[in-house]
Image (tube, helix red, strand yellow):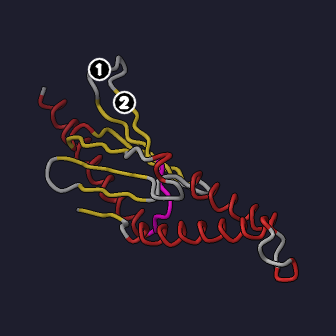
Amino acid sequence: MKKNNKNVIQLFKMLNFTIVILIILNLIMYAGILPYKYHIIPPYVVAIFIALLIYVSYKGGNQFFAIDTKGETITFETKNVGFLPFLDSKTNKIDLPKYKLIKYDFQKGILSKNVVFYINSKKKPTNLTKVKFRLAFISNRNINIILTELDKIVESNCMVKNNVEVAI
């Protein structure tokens, strides 16, 4: 199953454009190019609003996600498309075989949601590697689809593990 939210990219392009326009208008207001009688809102209120938009965009987490569970592998990818995305342009991506996924946790916060994968690893002494992804702007429907797909994978891995232990 493939799932992504590419429509968020267009929304954030419009939000970025709006923030840039607000910054330009705020600079015009501070510079005094417009007479004071045309100021509907004080410039400091606009500056606080712009800073709040940028903060929420940055702290919300990675806005774009893509997941692919077809075949023998799981591919999960997130990236930041918010305001000034070049500051945090690192794409978080994991591509692993399905049998290595031991369990996962889903945590819902105020601004963002976190998905934590626990992966079977031979490098660590505890044999578990923890990989965390921050998500934002994901619908409850998409969350439910992703969680049911991950449940199926983890359940099948437990069944295979139990069958192998019984056979030994």
| Residue 159 % position (x, y) | 22, 43
**Residue 119 occupies which quadrant of the picture?**
top left
**Amino acid type, mark 1:** Lys
| Residue 89 % position (x, y) | 43, 47
Give the magenta-colored segment's residue range. 134-140
Where, quadrant-wise, is the N terminus in this rendering? bottom left
Residue 42 colored magenta? Answer: no
Dot 2 falls on a residue whose secondary structure is strand
Label 1 – label 2 distance at C-alpha: 9 Å
Disc assigned to residue 123: 1
Is residue 48 or residue 137 the one in the foreground?
48
| Residue 141 % position (x, y) | 42, 70
**Relative to 123, residue 100 above or below:** below
Is residue 112 or residue 104 the one in the foreground?
112
Pointer 1 local density, CA inside 10 Å: few below 14, some 14–19, many at least 20:
few
The residue positioned 32% from the left and 52% from the top of the image is 150
The residue positioned 43% from the left and 68% from the top of the image is 8
Pointer 2 local density, CA inside 10 Å: few below 14, some 14–19, many at least 20:
some
Is residue 21 or residue 58 the one in the foreground?
21
**Relative to 93, residue 124 above or below:** above
Give the residue pinned by disc 2: 129
**Residue 168 occupies which quadrant of the picture?**
top left
**Relative to 118, residue 143 above or below:** below
The residue positioned 43% from the left and 43% from the top of the image is 116
**Amino acid type, mark 2:** Thr
Marks 1 & 2, CB-CB < 8 Å contact: yes
Dot 1 falls on a residue whose secondary structure is loop
Q: Is residue 79 left or right of residue 69?
A: right
Indicate which disc, 1 or 2, sits on the residue closer to the N terminus: 1
The residue positioned 29% from the left and 46% from the top of the image is 154
Disc assigned to residue 132: none
